[in-house]
Amino acid sequence: MEEKEIIALLRHKRHDWMNQIQLIQGYASLGKQAPLLSQIKEVIEEAEEERKLLNSGADEFSLWLLTFNWVHKAYRIRYYLRNEVDLSRHDIQLKAYGKRMIEIMDGHIGNEELYEGRLTIYVGGQDTLGLSWEWEGYFQEPEGLKEKLNDQGFIATIFESKELSIEMTIE
């Protein structure tokens, strides 16, 4: 990673943190205790997930996820690691699968739609690595999208053209 990319990453991260701090400050100045505590809890949870991701040993995949919301304007993702997990031996593969999934989805999204996603990473039976992607938004040609994802080794399910579930397992 070059210096300009590092500076851009830090700039985006700082911007995100400042937005969250300003929300907290706003709730505090208005005396809105419930939303204030909720926002603080959200910041703590996000920082904890980021810590687990950065400690996973998957530098390329971690960087891809950390910059995802800034790079992909039509998508917003939140990620969760169920436990501390070593992803180092799957690093390149995880990034490649993630990029391929988005490339396929890009052919089935609307121009004005924002797709909200949630990624859960977990260790499954027999020490397999599982990734569960949940996406909300209206998908065009949902059966074609499902077929393309399944042909690439994903396990995809679509509900009413607006909820996409993608499962991945890596041994």
Image (spheres, helix red, strand yellow):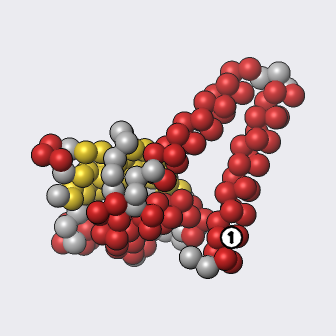
Camera sees residue 134 = no
* Mark 1 neighbour density, 10 Å: few (under 14) some (14–19) many (20 or more): few
**What amino acid type is highlighted by mark number 1?**
Ala
Residue at the image point whose x is 82% and y is 34% from the top:
26
Q: Where is residue 74 in the image (x, y as percent from the top left)?
A: 54, 65
Relative to 69, residue 26 above or below: above
Residues 161 and 55: in front is 55
Q: Is mark 1 on a helix, strand or loop?
A: helix
Q: In this view, does 87 lie above or below 28?
A: below
Is 47 placed left or right of 165 in the picture? right
The residue at 38%/68% (across/down) is 95
Which residue ends up furthest to the left in the rendered image? 126
Place of residue 40 in the rendered image (x, y in percent of width and height, measured from the top left): 66, 31
Quarter that holds the C terminus = bottom left
Q: Mark 1 points at which residue?
A: 8
Quadrant in the rendering for residue 41: top right
> Viewer-proximal residue, 111 or 94?
94
Query: Would you say 4 lies left or right of 144 here?
Result: right
Judge whether 22 appears above or below 100 on screen.
Answer: above
Q: Is residue 151 left or right of residue 158?
A: left
- Measured from the top left, where is residue 15 in percent x and y? 74, 56
